[in-house]
Image (cartoon, rainbow, N blue to C red):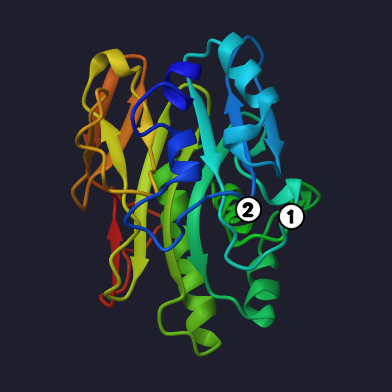
Amino acid sequence: MDELVYNTTHSLIEQSRSARFTSHLTNADGFGVGWYGTRDAPGVHRSVSQAWSDRNLQNLCAQIKSPLFLAHVRATTGTPVQQTNCHPFHHGRCSSSTTASSTNTRACAATCCWPSDPALLDGIEGTTDSELLFFLALTFGLEDEPLPALERMARFVEATGRGHGVDEPLQTTLGVSDGERLHAVRYTSGQVEPHTLHVSNDAEDVQLLSIPRTNACNTSPRRHARSSPSRWPTCRDSGLRYRRPRHSSSSRAPTSNSHLRHA
């Protein structure tokens, strides 16, 4: 994993200590990696240390070879700096790394927790919006049909937020995986531009999904291209594919004043 986490020009380590074109110069409030190997569930290592100075992360990345992994560096937007708030979050085979900004009132958070499958509630260990969105998506069917589940999750958060007087309740870019496929979605309520999403166009880049905190990626030896709206990339062993959103029979289309953008 060190080739991608450490050894590229705009590696995750570089983004943790010197992010550009972002509101956070550093992403120093923790990090995490989740990788798939010989077992069904992913291996996960999370820490509140700065990623660039953590020797354990460096040693792990130098040893671990994985066909699919998620890595994340964190800059808190107000929730505590603690291990349970570090990404990726995981349940069973599913894991998720997210950049999210959702409604921030206590009443909304409590309401958003309410529909979660009771069997999943014990898995919510932290206090971030990102983790709550992941478990809501699991409740809405993430393991069986990822895109419709994410649409249902977003629709529920929007309805809840607007019910509490929040006009633009949700902005998120997220990557989710089941160990075989890696999906990415950009979503924003209202007219706000969603967080950026970049994907690799290089087959030798092992279908790396990147959600960088910087847009300065074009000079990297491992080239990452910014995805255009209204496409949903899926990475698997057969390569990188883009698809348009498809709504399941149990999923109503988003309302006209929101923009679902699958990069």
Measured in 3D between alpha carbons, the distance from the residue under mark 1 to the one under mark 2, in whole angstroms, is 7 Å
Kindly identify the amino acid type of the residue bearing the numbered disc 1: Gly
- Whether the residues at callouts 1 and 2 have beta carbons within 8 Å, the answer is yes
Q: Is residue 43 visible to the viewer in this orientation of the structure? A: no
Q: Quadrant of residue 202?
A: top left
Does residue 134 appear left or right of residue 261 in this picture? right
Residue in front for this viewpoint, 74 or 198: 74
Q: Evaluate whether residue 219 shows in this view.
A: yes
State whether residue 114 is above or below residue 146: below
Give the amino acid at mark 2.
Glu
Q: Residue furthest right?
A: 122
Count how many numbered circles sit on residues in the image. Answer: 2
Measured from the top left, where is residue 256 in percent x and y?
Answer: 25, 75
The numbered disc on residue 126 is 1
Which label's residue is closer to the chain start, 1 or 2?
A: 1
SS for tag 2? helix
Front-lying residue, 210 or 245: 210
In this figure, which residue is indicated by the disc labeled 2? 131
* Mark 1 neighbour density, 10 Å: few (under 14) some (14–19) many (20 or more): some
